[in-house]
Amino acid sequence: METVWIAHPNLGDRKVEVPVSALPHHQRAGWEETDAPPPPPLPEPDPGPDDDPPDKTADQTDGAPADAGASSLPDESPRRRRTTTRGDE
């Protein structure tokens, strides 16, 4: 499907991609054909293992154990209570 980019003069820099077949409909509503927006910048690459400082190891990153998500404490999420009585009680 072939598409075009359109912009509306009252909406600032907002650009929308629509099918070519819908262009006449949008033009009657005030939209104008425009150039495609520039592509987003590429993310910076993650630092490799050679970029880590030598004084920190995987065990000493923040003073937390490696499996900080696993806890020996019981789950403290709220529990549901029965608010109605059963007939067999």
Image (cartoon, rainbow, N blue to C red):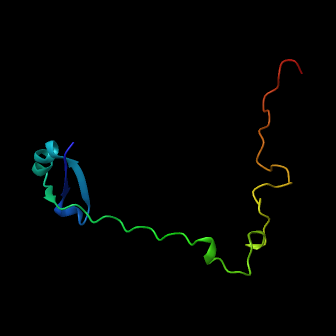
**Residue drawn 77% across the image and 38% down it:** 80
Query: Which is nearer the eye, 55 or 67?
Result: 55
Which image quadrant is residue 52 in?
bottom right
**Residue drawn 73% across the image and 72% down it:** 61
**Residue drawn 13% across the image and 57% down it:** 32
In the rendering, at what x and y percent does residue 22 appear?
16, 44
Horizontally, residue 78 falls left or right of residue 74, namely: left
In the rendering, at what x and y percent does residue 16 appear?
25, 55
Query: Which is nearer the eye, 64 or 59?
Result: 59
| 1 relative to 49, above or below | above
Quarter that holds the C terminus = top right
**Residue drawn 19% across the image and 62% down it:** 10
In the rendering, at what x and y percent does residue 8 appear?
18, 59
In the rendering, at what x and y percent does residue 40 appear?
35, 65
Which image quadrant is residue 62 in?
bottom right
What is the count of numbered marks?
0
| 54 relative to 45, above or below | below
